[in-house]
Amino acid sequence: MGSITLRQVQKHFGEAKVIPSVDLEIKEGEFVVFVGPSGSGKSTLLRLIAGLEDLTGGTITIDGKDVTEAAPAARGLAMVFQSYALYPHMSVRKNIAFPLKMAKMEQSAIDKKVEAAAKVLNLTDYLERRPSQLSGGQRQRVAIGRAIVREPSAFLFDEPLSNLDAALRGTMRLEISDLHNQLKTTMIYVTHDQIEAMTMADKIVVLNRGNIEQVGSPMELYLTPRNLFVAGFIGSPR
Ligand code: ADP
Ligand code: MG
């Protein structure tokens, strides 16, 4: 579960060819980071995978099934939004349970799933609190909890830590990596931060003006950057 294939994926906004043509293979269980400067098309590519934008051309396959035309909810993916997307008037428990409530799952099953997610995220003691009574890191974990309970085949993160201070970003980086080790679910993580890319990724996808400059492990990109853009962006000495 969680293999994703992009074939000649294109996205134009009017005259602007924001994604000229992208081919990409994401394997089951991989932690893939899309990295590149602001405006390089990272969010657009993620939104195309999530089904939040229509493709101009090409196909997207998830677990061997063509989902190019499929609605977001039919893709089995979970997009993790920044922590401010929590409902302030609801407890942590209700925030995490929300997608399951919407899906009309039975209450006892909801409780089980929420408690399991809370355990993974170290939120067990905070389930009855409101988001305003939590730290920034805990709020971010609640947002992730809301994705976990849906048991997606892949998690999609779009710069989830950009609103946090530097110290908390470091902690959350470790927590998300740890979560990946526990769940072993495919994760696609968008960032403009080279350090996040280098420390978290199994595979880095370097984007520049909507094109993939290089795909490889952090070490491969560091030791054998294909061009000056990759070298400059990843920070290797060449
Ligand atoms: P990133 O996430 O890497 O910063 P984006 O994917 O948000 O980049 O944007 C890539 C390019 O596409 C930018 O030039 C942006 O202005 C353009 N773009 C994104 N969304 C739209 C849209 N809805 N309409 C027009 N242009 C857009
Ligand atoms: Mg973006």
Image: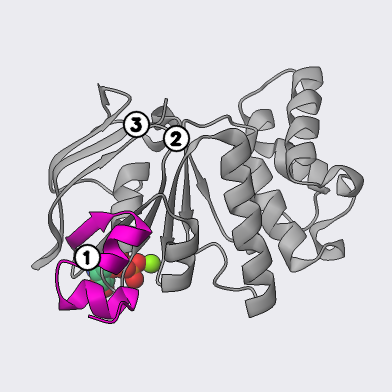
Give yes or no for contact between labels 1 and 2 (Cβ–Cβ under 8 Å): no
Q: Position of residue 83 (x, y in %)?
A: 65, 60
Q: Is residue 95 above or below residue 85?
A: above
The tag on residue 3 is: 3
Q: Position of residue 15 (x, y in %)?
A: 8, 67
Report crowding for label 1: few under 14, some 14 to 19, many 20 or more residues within 10 A (C-alpha).
Answer: some
Identify the amino acid type marked 1: Thr
Residue highlighted by disc 2: 29
Residue ID at (26%, 80%): 232
Q: Is mark 2 within 8 Å of ligand 2?
A: no
Give the quarter the ligand 2 occupies.
Answer: bottom left
Q: Which residues are magenta?
A: 212-238
Residue ID at (66%, 29%): 100
Who comes first in sequence, dot 1 or dot 2? 2
Q: Disc 1 on helix, strand or loop? A: loop
State which quadrant residue 119 falls in. Answer: top right
- For this rendering, which residue is in front, 177 or 237? 237
Identify the amino acid type marked 2: Gly
Residue highlighted by disc 1: 224
Report crowding for label 3: few under 14, some 14 to 19, many 20 or more residues within 10 A (C-alpha).
Answer: some
Who comes first in sequence, dot 2 or dot 3? 3
Report the side of 8 relative to 204 (left or right).
left
Q: Whole-Å distance between the Cαs marked 3 and 1?
A: 26 Å
Q: Position of residue 208 (x, y in %)?
A: 21, 70
Q: Is residue 150 above or below residue 177?
A: above
Q: Whole-Å distance between the Cαs marked 2 and 3?
A: 8 Å
